[in-house]
Amino acid sequence: MDFSLVFLLNSILLGVGLAMDAFSVSIANSLNEPNMKKGRMCMIAGVFAGFQFLMPIVGWICVHTIAQKFAAFQKCIPYIALALLAFIGGKMLYEGIRGGEEEEEAAAVGFGALMIQGIATSIDALSVGFTIADYNWMMALVACILIAVVTFAICMGGLLVGKKVGNKLSGKANILGGVILIAIGLEIFIKGVFF
């Protein structure tokens, strides 16, 4: 395969598909923190984009070096994603049910939780390394950059949507955000284990 319009479209569509979990988590994050500033929004979208860039590259490297070991790990991906998202979502649910406007602001997603979300929403992108295995190093790099750019744009959209809705939901945003994260974890798990 070479650089072409088909390559460009495939990479962009791959980015859209991979970004859907991060989009939903972005909505949940901005529901949790409706007064989020633009710099923080860029940081959150940047973290998701960074992980969506990194995971396919790691998958590509695994395909070209340790493919058998990676195939065994791939079976664990749904379980890991469910555990990470259920943990963060459960924490948000707990904070939302416990109530109080002050606790809601204090429950804003911290850096550690954001890293866990980034891993949980992009871990399935490791398998993209298999789909781009026939690309040379430069094409794999360009494809992953395109995936990251698409993810950044989609996550910014999710943050804006959640921010608009979050201001209207005020005290219930933590509960909704937690439910969304747990639902995403279940969706990844069910898709990965049963389909």
Image: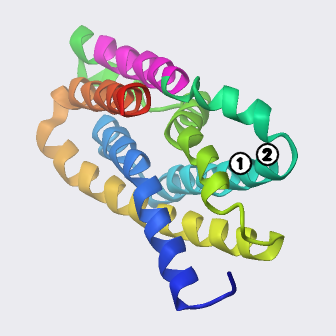
Identified at 38% across, 40% down, the residue is: 29
Closest to the observer: 14 or 44?
14
Type of amino acid under label 1: Gly
Seen in the picture, residue 79 relative to 144 is either above or below; the reply is above
Identify the disc placed on residue 62: 2
In the image, residue 57 lies at what x, y percent?
73, 55
Residue carrying label 1: 59
In the image, residue 15 lies at what x, y percent?
49, 64
Q: Report, in whole angstroms, how far the alpha carbon at label 2 lies from the one at label 1.
A: 5 Å
- Residue 55 sits inside the magenta stretch: no
In the image, residue 58 lies at what x, y percent?
75, 48
Is there CB contact under 8 Å for labels 2 and 1?
yes
Tell me where the magenta segment starts and ends, as one range.
79-95
Quadrant housing the N terminus: bottom right
Disc 2 on helix, strand or loop? Answer: helix
Closest to the observer: 176 or 133?
133
